[in-house]
Image (cartoon, grey):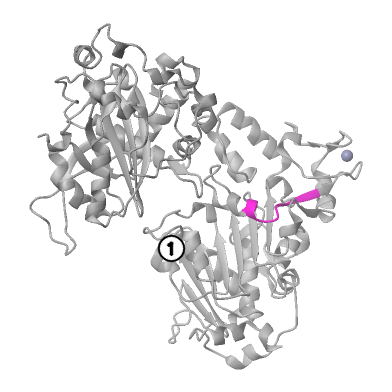
Amino acid sequence: MFDAHPLDVVLTDGNEIVCGSWSRGWTMPEPITLSDWADRYRKLPKEGSSEAGDWYTSRMPFLREIMDCLHRESRVREITLKKSTQVGGTEVGINWLGYIIEHAPAPVMYVLPTIDIARKFSEQRLTPAINLMPVLQERIPPARSRDGGNTTLMKRFPGGVLVLSGANSSASLASMPMMYLILDELSKYPTNLDDQGGAEQQALARTSSFTRRKILRISSCTIKDACAISTAFDAGDQSYLYLPCPHCAHKQVLMIDQLTDDGQFVCIHCGKLIEEHHKTRMLEAGEWIAKHPERSQSHRSFAIWSAFAAVGLGYTWREIAAMRVETRKDPAKEVVFVNTILGEAYEGASQKVEANDVQQRAAKWLRRTVPRGGFILTAGVDVQVNRFAVITIAWGRNEQAFVVDYVELPADPTRKEDWDILWDFLAEPVINAAGITLHISAVAVDSGNWTQEVYNAVRPRQSQGVMAIKGSKDAARPIIGRASKQEVDKSGRIQRRGVNLWIIGVNSAKTTLMQRLLGDTDREEENRLIHFPADLPDEFYTMLTAERFDLTAKRWLKKQGARNEALDTFVYAYAAALSPSVRIHVKREADWVALEAKLEPPTDDLFTAPLGREEKKGPDKAPKIDVQTSAVPRETDHRSAPALAPRTNNPFASSDWLDRR
Ligand SMILES: [Zn+2]
């Protein structure tokens, strides 16, 4: 009997959170489902609800099954509600809070996107709801009473505590262990907070010590692939609401493409029109059916959209149809319509570059060679905990880019000697189509992580074109501006020999690169702006296209869990190419002609012929190789080429570029 009680878990954890009246907590209350609890106690305030007074689950019958997963005896641990507006999502959260306070006391955390929103939620939604329910009022001391048990963001009650948190603050999420967790508007949480991981993960960590924990996620969607509620929904049992047709009784999920422009649904079975006045009866007979019933024991996930809202509580079908007509006229409204009415993640037709499409463009030349038209080399370096990710790009007229190489060098950035792996690799020569050796003109190294290590490594090499850079979150920032000399050592003092730090407008750079990749779709190989060798691995293209433009956030966001170093390093190499020592964007035709004369001299010798290695076939036969993870030079035939390459006095051919001043 006692192991079934949540207080037991609290005690064995030794938490000091249980205060107030213990005696009440030791009495097992009668079992009651959350929907029955809400029908008995819940009152809707006048403010913020269209139907004040008693709560009736029968008004939104589809909420019954969702709510009943939340009652204490249910074995379901995770409940996800992917929703549009006006379907009662947050009311489910408030009902559950009331049930926990009155019936199943335990520590519970309610997370909203920011602390400000959490405060408003407490003042405008929660407090009015509590004040209407005497069973809750008597358990929570009056606000600002002397024992401090009731503040805007924390409410103690016998046997538990409610903490309201903002997902914008690690400090706010770092609290005591929590048995229950509510993640409201989850898709608006930051995916990396104070470099300690996503806010969702930080909040989830609070529940890890409770085996009987419950997690409720409620949110509308954002952009496809970056939408946390969609990810959670997909991980659950994926339940959809099936309603019977009033004419033929065939059960179906009402979809937007069944909706006529005058606001009626067409039955997918009998083809007859379903009208709004049928809805109430249909909802009463509604049934949640899971696509993955094998997951229903542990994670129920539900999808609901505005068409299911009870008559009188949301938009009418006619209004939804009218809004859809508006989106046809104004595509900017489409994203709002998809997120807030359809309750789905938005995947715009624009700004979408697919890995496969780009991979099809792989040319015949191989990595570590530069085809005709590429004259100036830059590199971009992303510093990770156990590796350097390095891209090398050759640039030509009109900012044409040729990907020369992408490698990942295993290394520990905190070890001084490991940086030599990077410098040695960057010093390796690259051969162009004329057999001439090219060297790298500028290298941009990201200092966003491992800041001090990057500063220390870059400082002695700045005169050789190595730059410390940092990506800016400011969406409108230019790709590269002026460097600022700023270095603070570990003790917090400004150092006299500072490092020049270049702030990179990563968002602008990504937009530019993605538009070029999109624009290249319909171009012939010789007219494309970005070119790829034959032998880059599949992963390179996946990483290059791992981000989508978020129309709401107005910036590029990574798919959840995806890697994007190929794109990040490309951005850094591009910034290096635009930096004052290189400036590919302001070179005149005369400059390119001069470079061409030096680097691609018109001769009849064997070097002007296509490189022998070009006889390998293109992408179809591209060898499937892993992303290079070794600093050991590869056994490729370019190793023999330098001996044949004529020595020239071109500025990029020096073999000691690291020492160049
Ligand atoms: Zn029908």
Q: Give SS at disc 1.
A: helix
Any part of residue 519 in sight: yes
Specify the quadrant of the image occupied by residue 134: bottom right
Q: Quadrant of ligand 1?
A: top right
Specify the quadrant of the image occupied by residue 255: top right
Of residues 40 and 223, the one drawn nearer to the viewer in this rendering: 223
* Residue 535 position in % (x across, y down): 45, 30
Inspect the image, locate mark 1, and give the three-letter code of the amino acid beneath it: Ile
Please identify the quadrant where the N terminus is shown. Answer: bottom right
Any part of residue 478 in sight: no
Please identify the quadrant where the C terminus is shown. Answer: top left
Of residues 651 and 149, the one drawn nearer to the viewer in this rendering: 651
Label 1: which residue? Answer: 115
Of residues 476 and 312, the one drawn nearer to the viewer in this rendering: 476
Residue at the far top in the pictured view: 604
Magenta residues, start to end: 233-242
* Residue 458 position in % (x across, y down): 19, 46
Residue at (86% x, 33% y) in the render: 271
Residue at (21% x, 26% y) in the render: 583
* Residue 62 position in % (x across, y down): 75, 57
